[in-house]
Amino acid sequence: MDAGVPIKNTCAGISVGRFSDENDQNEVFVTDIIGEEDFFGDMDFKVSGTREGITGIQLDLKARGLTIKQIDRIFAQAKRGRFHIIEQMESVIPAPRQTISPFAPRLITITINPEKIGKLIGPGGKMIRAIQDKWGVTIEVEDDGTVFISAPNGEAIAGAQTEVEALTAEIKVGTIFTGKVVSMKDFGVFVELAAGTDGMCHISELATGYVKQVTDVVKIGDVIKVKVINVDDQGRIKLSRKAVMMDEQKATEAAAH
């Protein structure tokens, strides 16, 4: 529940132990979750379940057997114990959390264009290994473009998913990317949208006002948001930082009103 697993009902378990004399004439049933009955008693009857019913049982028995009357008593005693534990659990956390814990392992499936598989894998597996090593994840790719990513936590899987999607993304006009400035020229800058995919942002598209020179706005290594404004027949990508800034400004003004 704390991890965000969407279980239908709170589930708890309890053990009922049995002690008897040599002639099996006198007996006592104890409610226990520690395990003393394993060593000193002749029965360890574990029952797990919810308020709705039993989900599992497991019995260790040194005696020759149990009667129906004994089993009725055991289940009734286990029910009381189970309900008590459920009440204690729900006083701390009444329902599963709405989101999965960031520390919980994850497995996701995404679909990419099969033509992009080679780019994801890279020469000799260079690209896919780099992503796996960086985030500590496992990536498996099917021929139809199905990609399985498994990771030990939420941060790792989010980071790996972002890189896979960026690397295999279909560059379309209007798409906004967060990329790194990797090259600077007098006429503009080149921004890395994904590993092996760069776009050019002209100096006139770097800011909403006049820009005298590129270095007045950005420098190598800066991470900036850019919008794709054109992809020509040769696959060259034109970007605009100004378009993103204008969109954000409009959104802010709209929210203010």
Image: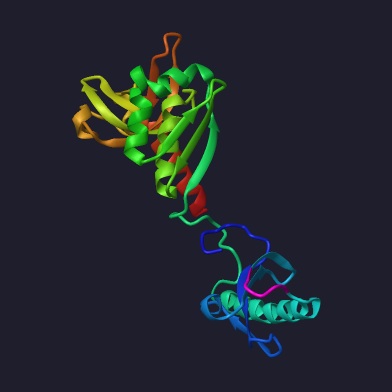
Question: Which quadrant of the rendered structure holds the N terminus?
Answer: bottom right
**Residue drawn at x 42%, y 9% as measured from the top left:** 234
Residue nearest the observer in this picture, 130 or 32: 32
- Residue 205 coordinates in the image, percent (x, y): 34, 27
> Which residue appears farthest toward the right when viewing the image?
68
Dominant SS type (magenta): loop
Horizontally, residue 114 falls left or right of residue 151, namely right
Residue nearest the observer in this picture, 147 or 182: 147
- Residue 39 coordinates in the image, percent (x, y): 52, 77
- Residue 212 coordinates in the image, percent (x, y): 21, 28
Q: Could you say which quadrant of the image residue 190 lies in? A: top left
Q: Could you say which quadrant of the image residue 202 lies in? A: top left
In the rendered image of this protein, does residue 144 appear above or below residue 218? above
Horizontally, residue 7 falls left or right of residue 73, namely left
Q: Which residues are magenta?
A: 60-65
**Residue drawn at x 55%, y 58% as measured from the top left:** 4
Q: Could you say which quadrant of the image residue 75 lies in? A: bottom right
Q: Is residue 252 among the parts visible in the rendering? A: yes
**Residue drawn at x 44%, y 49% as measured from the top left:** 154
Q: Is residue 198 among the parts visible in the rendering? A: no
In the rendered image of this protein, does residue 173 appear above or below residue 249? above
- Residue 227 coordinates in the image, percent (x, y): 42, 30
